[in-house]
Amino acid sequence: MGIVKISDLMHENLRVAGNALSRSINAQAEHWMRVGMLTEMHPELDHREICQLLIRAELAGGLDIVAAVTPQTGKPRASSTGKH
């Protein structure tokens, strides 16, 4: 685990969003990072599809970046290796 420096404004944004969505600041930051990462890797997917991908990945044991970039019948797939 490492330390990531962010601006005071982003920290406040994370705090507000985390409180609104019942997440810790760290959990909110990690959520936004996962969504952003998958959005950049798969610009063809909308937010609903990204959320479904995250849920499938969680059910399979966590998001694996290698599996996330490997298309399976036109869609990214989740793998049971690695935990987000």
Image: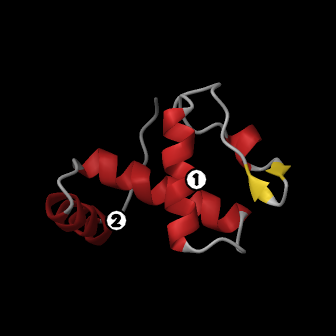
Q: Nearer the viewer, residue 38 or 2?
A: 38
Q: Where, by quadrant of the figure, is residue 37 drawn?
A: bottom right
Name the spot of residue 77 as percent of width and height, x first: 71, 46
Q: Tell me the crowding category of disc 2: few under 14, some 14 to 19, or many 20 or more residues within 10 angstroms, Cα based.
A: few
Can residue 80 be seen in this snapshot?
Answer: yes
Q: Nearer the viewer, residue 14 or 77?
A: 77
Residue 61 image position (x, y, % from top left):
53, 28
Residue behind mark 1: 53
Query: Which residue sits furthest front?
Result: 73
Q: Residue at x 22, y 50 (%)?
A: 23
Could you say which quadrant of the image residue 21 lies in? bottom left
Query: Which amino acid does the dot numbered 1 rest on?
Result: Leu
Give the vertical position of 59 relative to 76 (above or below).
above
- Residue matched to label 2: 7
Query: Which residue is located at x 32 percent, y 46 percent?
Result: 27
Which residue: 46% across, 34% down?
2
Question: Which quadrant holds residue 82?
Answer: top right
Q: Residues within 10 Å of mark 1 (few under 14, many from 20)?
A: many
Give the CA distance from mark 1 to mark 2.
29 Å
The amino acid on which the numbered mark 2 sits, given as a three-letter code, is Ser
**Which element carries disc 2, helix, strand or loop?**
loop
Which of marks 2 and 1 precedes in the sequence?
A: 2
